[in-house]
Amino acid sequence: MAFEVNDASFVSKLAEQGAVLLDVRSPAEFRQVHVAGAINLPLEKVSEASVKKILQDKASSVVVLLCAAGTRARKAAEQLEASDLKLVVITGGTNACLQLNIPVIRGETKTISIERQVRIAAGAIVLIGVVLGFTVHPYFFFVSGFIGAGLMFAGVTDWCGMGLLIAKAPWNK
């Protein structure tokens, strides 16, 4: 069962009590900035077995799930719902921790976040579709329409296929 906490200051309190901080962002995002003491386990690798393997050397069975803003942490909690793990999701994620000046570790690499990469890719595809629609054939306007529909779907369902694909790109590993 997962508990959602709206106050990111609980991260420090839970960490002091021995809870395991599990950051489910991509390794590239994690390297850029993460809460001190957090362990990286990308969302696509989250399973009961992988989390229990991390917990085997730890004294606590409480797992604090973090991501950038809380969305991926909630998805990880949903994936682990059937387990007997004690899960806490921090609403606002690492971004909220940064605002509260909770200790973080900053890497030297400046990787663009997955969300920004999706915006760049979607914008580029829409622009190319419009230019090709005017210069080559009007059917290319459908490319732009398809991307627009995909963005609307992502906004409504909170599931972004383009984001999942970009997260698997070699530069995000």
Image (cartoon, rainbow, N blue to C red):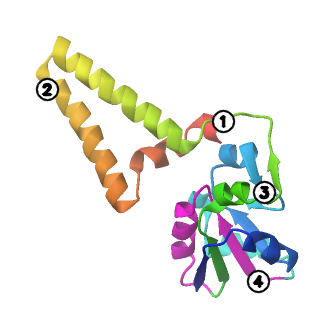
At horizontal 23% and vertical 17% (from top left) the residue drawn is: 132
Amino acid under disc 3? Asn
Q: Which residues are magenta?
A: 60-83
What residue sits right under mark 2 in the picture? Answer: 139
For label 4, the SS is loop
- Mark 2 vs mark 4, CA separation in Å: 55 Å
Q: Position of residue 143 (x, y in %)?
A: 24, 32
Q: Tell me whether the residue at label 3 lies in contact with that at label 1, contact meaning CB atoms closer than 8 angstroms.
A: no
Amino acid under disc 4? Ser
* 53 sits left or right of 68 in the view: right
Look at the image and tell me in which quarter the N terminus lies. bottom right
Q: Earlier in the sequence, mark 4 or mark 3?
A: 4
For label 1, the SS is loop
At horizontal 64% and vertical 88% (from top left) the residue drawn is: 84
What residue sits right under mark 4 in the picture? Answer: 61
Among the 4 quarters of the image, the one containing residue 64: bottom right
- Mark 1 vs mark 4, CA separation in Å: 32 Å
Q: Is residue 134 above or below residue 46?
A: above
Among the 4 quarters of the image, the one containing residue 67: bottom right
